[in-house]
Amino acid sequence: MNLAELRSVVRRELHDEEPGSYQWSNVELDRHVQHAVNELSLFVPLEATAVLTTSASRNLSVSGVSGLVRVEAVEYPVDRYPPLFAPFSLWGQTLTLLVEKSPISGESARLYYVKGHSVTGSGSTVPSHLEETVALGAAAYAALEWAAFAATRADPGAEAAASTTWPGGRARLPHSRGR
C-alpha cells in the first residue's frame, strides 16, 4: 500500500472523506502516518543485509549502510556452510570484527541488520498484515492532535491556568520547586 492509499484509509477511520472540507491536510496525515510507521519500526523493524568489503583491518565502516538501526550479526568469511558468524563490536560508524586474524583486503563480510520501514508514493516496506495497524495508529495520532487543539480552543485560559496551579487548585509561585 503506498502513501496515498494509506492516507485514504486513515481518512476513512477519521470520517474525513469529504474532499471539499477535509479536517486534516494531506501533509498533516502524512506526518501522522510517518509517526505510526516509526513506532511500528521499533517493534517490527525491516530486516536487511549488506555486504561490506574489508581492508587490511578489523575495522569496517557502516556509514554507507542505508537506514541502519541495529546490527544483528556479521557473517565472516561469507558463503561458508554452515555460515560463520564473527563476534563484533559497533561504536558509532565503525564495526570491529573481533577475530584473531585481520581480514585480507578485498574480502567480504555480510552484515545482517534492521532498519525502519518506509512508506512512499510508490510503495511501502510495511508488511501487508500490519498496514491496518499503521492506519489506525496514524488516525489515533491525528485524533490526539485534534483533541489537544480543541481543548485549548474551548478554554483559552486553561493552558495559562495549568502552568500557575498545582493539581488540587493550590497556587504555584513562578520558579518554585513544588513546596
Image (cartoon, rainbow, N blue to C red):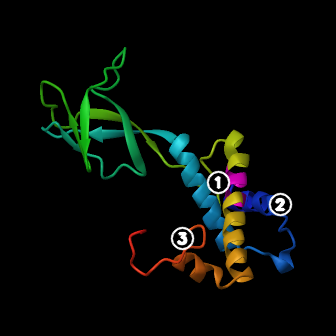
The 10 Å Cα crowd at callout 2, few under 14, some 14 to 19, many 20 or more, is: some
Q: Position of residue 177 (x, y in %)?
A: 38, 70
Q: Main secondary structure of the magenta part?
A: helix
Q: Position of residue 179 (x, y in %)?
A: 41, 69
**Residue 158 sits inside the magenta stretch:** no
**Residue 136 sits inside the magenta stretch:** yes
- Residue 135 in which image quadrant: bottom right
- Mark 1 to mark 3: distance in Å? 48 Å
Q: Is residue 72 above or below residue 168?
A: above
Q: Which residue is mark 3?
A: 166
Three-letter amino acid code at the position of disc 3: Trp
At horizontal 19% and vertical 30% (from top left) the residue drawn is 98
At horizontal 79% and vertical 63% (from top left) the residue drawn is 11
Residue range in magenta is 134-139
Q: Which secondary structure, mark 2?
A: helix
| Nearest the eye: 76 or 53 | 76
| 159 left or right of 129 in image | left
At horizontal 43% and vertical 51% (from top left) the residue drawn is 67
Q: Which residue is mark 2?
A: 12
| Nearest the eye: 52 or 160 | 160
Q: Which secondary structure, mark 3?
A: loop
Q: Which residue is mark 1?
A: 123
